[in-house]
Image (cartoon, helix red, strand yellow):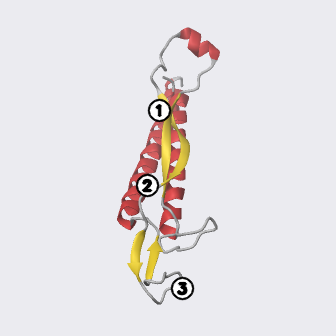
């Protein structure tokens, strides 16, 4: 595996974690949203990742199977959480029904915060891997001097 492949894998991780952070941010921003354009409260969303093979050129494919099994990551999609909405008794709320119950989003703030921390750490790990590959490439150029 060459250094550019390592950087490519880490770059796919950066893209995936940025998308994950966007979904978490959306969930946290809408934790109190009781009305959406689709009708009803906001429904929490989750991101789905999929492993993707490392792209290699034809020459590398003929030379051997060095990159076989190497996988990057890509975003497959964003799905809505099917968990029931939370029922909160608040008769003064404009969206309360005749019983005084308001349907609130199914966003769990604690889970979202843990997901945000996990995405942040994964992003940092990918940045570190890219920096390590860059450092190795620079050191290999110094060998030729």
**Mark number displayed over residue 120:** 2
Near mark 3 (Cα within 10 A), the count class, few <14, some 14-19 or many ≥20, is: few
Q: Where is residue 27 in the image (x, y as percent from the top left)?
A: 49, 63
Asked whether the residues under the numbered discs 2 and 1 touch, taking CB atoms below 8 Å apart as contact, a structural biologist would say: no
Q: Is residue 136 visible?
A: yes
State which quarter of the image contains the C terminus: top right
Name the quadrant containing residue 61.
Answer: top right
Query: Is residue 116 placed above or below 94 in the rendered structure?
Result: above
Mark drawn on residue 136:
1
Residue 15 in view (yes/no):
no
Q: Are marks 1 and 3 in contact (CB under 8 Å)?
A: no
Can you give x and y, in whole percent of width and height, for residue 121 in the image?
A: 40, 52
> Does label 2 or label 1 sit earlier along the sequence?
2
Q: How far separated are the C-alphas under marks 1 and 3?
A: 60 Å
Comes first in the chain, label 2 or label 3: 3
Residue at 43% across / 52% down in the picture?
119
Of the pair 111 and 92, the residue shown nearer to us: 92
Chain-order first, disc 1 or disc 3: 3
Residue 133: x, y in percent?
48, 35
Kindly identify the residue that appears in the image at 54 percent across and 43 percent down. 75
Instruction: Check the image and report above or below for 120 versus 143.
Output: below
Q: Depth-wise, is mark 2 or mark 1 nearer the camera?
A: 2
Residue 104: x percent and y percent?
A: 46, 72
Mark 3: which secondary structure? loop
Circle 2 crowding by C-alpha within 10 Å: few under 14, some 14–19, many from 20: some
Helix, strand or loop at mark 1: helix
User: Mark 2, mark 3: which one is toward the viewer?
Assistant: 3
**Number of disc labels:** 3
Secondary element type, mark 2: helix
Q: In the rendered image, which residue does mark 3 sit on?
A: 94
Q: Residue at x 57, y 73 (%)?
A: 35
């Amino acid at each position: 595996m060459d250094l550019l492949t390592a950087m490519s894998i880490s770059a796919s991780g950066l893209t995936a974690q940025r998308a994950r952070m966007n979904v978490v941010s959306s969930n946290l921003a809408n934790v109190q949203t009781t009305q959406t354009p689709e009708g009803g409260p906001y429904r929490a969303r989750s991101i789905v990742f999929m492993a993707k093979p490392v792209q290699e050129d034809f020459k590398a494919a003929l030379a051997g199977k060095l990159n076989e099994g190497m996988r990057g990551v890509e975003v497959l999609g964003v799905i809505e959480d099917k968990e029931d909405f939370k029922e909160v008794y608040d008769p003064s709320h404009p969206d309360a029904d005749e019983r005084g119950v308001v349907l609130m989003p199914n966003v769990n703030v604690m889970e979202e915060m843990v997901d945000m921390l996990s995405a942040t750490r994964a992003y940092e790990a990918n940045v570190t891997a890219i920096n390590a590959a860059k450092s190795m490439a620079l050191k290999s150029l110094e060998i030729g001097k």
